[in-house]
Image (cartoon, helix red, strand yellow):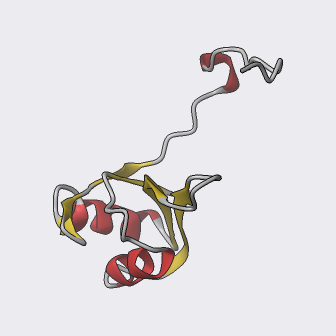
Amino acid sequence: QLFVGNLSWGTTDDSLHQAFSQFGQVQDTIVLKDRETGRSRGFGFVTMESADEAQAAIDAMNEQELDGRTIRVNIANDRPAGDRPPRDNNFGG
């Protein structure tokens, strides 16, 4: 899975899929959206069929322009749960 950062607010799941499909089989794309406004949060994820295709996409797309913004593309690394701060479930405000 690839992390794609610095996305334009206009970038959609479909446009992200289209941009990455030239490097291989795209299994899934998602642009994360703000829960309340529905607007893009400026990053997303792309899942490629193979590691080779993912690397080709990184090599070609990292620091390139997509929808008017210079995007960052790298391997999405899952941090072990122990590396995250404890979650505050008090739902304060």
Question: Picture coordinates of residue 87 (x, y %)?
Answer: 73, 20
Which residue occupies the foreground of this view, 46 or 54? 46
Residue visible at 22% across and 61% down in the picture? 59
Residue visible at 62% across and 20% down in the picture? 84
| 47 horizontally vs 59: left or right | right
Question: Picture coordinates of residue 86 (x, y %)?
Answer: 71, 15
Question: Picture coordinates of residue 20 (x, y %)?
Answer: 36, 76
Number of marks drawn: 0
Which residue sits furthest right?
90
Above or below residue 47? Residue 4 is above
| 60 horizontally vs 55: left or right | left
**Location of the C terminus (image quadrant):** top right
Question: Picture coordinates of residue 57 (x, y %)?
Answer: 31, 67
Residue visible at 41% across and 49% down in the picture? 75
* Image quarter of residue 55: bottom left
* Image quarter of residue 33: bottom right
Residue visible at 49% across and 60% down in the picture? 39
Above or below residue 69? Residue 84 is above
Above or below residue 60? Residue 33 is above
Which residue occupies the foreground of this view, 14 or 26? 14
Which residue occupies the foreground of this view, 9 or 61? 9
| 22 horizontally vs 84: left or right | left
* Image quarter of residue 69: bottom left
| 67 horizontally vs 52: left or right | left
